[in-house]
Image: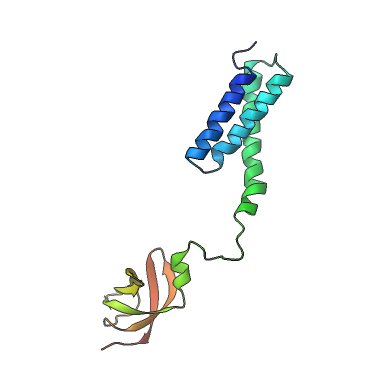
């Protein structure tokens, strides 16, 4: 029997899939599936040399990750019913808010709910009503709706 027998591949598959559960990201899952396939292959061909096993495992890992990337990932990321889910800034575009701090030299703050967001736009006094026209990271680009006192 070779250094890496089918039980070693099954153990590696369990460890990789278990690690995927601890640190999810889908990457280790597919390599774990490739290790499981190697367990099946070494059960069918027990005399397969270690070098051939390593090469086959590498090719199966690449094929499994490519299959995930090409077929599974686009299906899993499809969310047409709520395209702005988890995009808080994008949800604010078109909404109106009141400046909590004046915009001076293009920078100020706007109150959104119980928090304050950075705002960029024309210089305006605090209390002015503004509308969000775009989002750049955590900064809201605003335009004036009505200037405050």
- Of 63 and 4, the residue lying toward us: 4
- Above or below, 79 relative to 132: above
**Quadrant of residue 101 within the rendered picture:** bottom left
**Quadrant of residue 3 within the rendered picture:** top right
- Above or below, 18 relative to 55: below
How many numbered discs sit on the rendered protein? 0
Image point (52%, 44%), residue name: 25
Image point (61%, 39%), residue name: 65
Left or right: where does residue 29 sit relative to residue 134?
right
Left or right: where does residue 140 sit relative to residue 73?
left
Image point (61%, 25%), residue name: 10
Q: Quadrant of the N terminus?
A: top right
- Above or below, 72 relative to 97: above
Q: Quadrant of the C terminus?
A: bottom left
- Of 90 and 134, the residue lying toward us: 90
**Could you tell me residue 38's position as x and y percent?**
66, 26
Extreme residue in the right direction: 44
**Quadrant of residue 50 within the rendered picture:** top right
Name the colouring of the figure: rainbow
**Could you tell me residue 33's position as x and y percent?**
63, 34
**Could you tell me residue 110's position as x and y percent?**
33, 74
**Could you tell me residue 45's position as x and y percent?**
73, 18
Image point (74%, 20%), residue name: 44
């Amino acid at each position: 029997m070779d250094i890496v027998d089918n039980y070693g591949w099954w153990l590696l598959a369990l460890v990789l899939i278990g690690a995927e559960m601890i640190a999810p990201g889908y990457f280790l899952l597919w390599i774990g599936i490739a290790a499981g396939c190697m367990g099946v292959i070494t059960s069918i061909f027990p005399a397969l040399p270690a070098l051939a096993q390593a090469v086959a495992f590498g090719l199966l890992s690449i094929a499994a990750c490519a299959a995930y990337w090409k077929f599974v990932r686009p299906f899993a990321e499809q969310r047409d019913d709520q395209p702005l889910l988890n995009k808080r800034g994008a949800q604010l575009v078109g909404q109106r808010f009141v400046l909590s701090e004046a915009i001076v030299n293009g920078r100020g703050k706007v109150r959104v709910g119980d928090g304050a967001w950075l705002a960029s736009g024309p210089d305006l006094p605090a209390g002015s009503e503004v509308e969000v026209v775009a989002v750049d990271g955590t900064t809201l680009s605003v335009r004036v709706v009505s200037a405050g006192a």
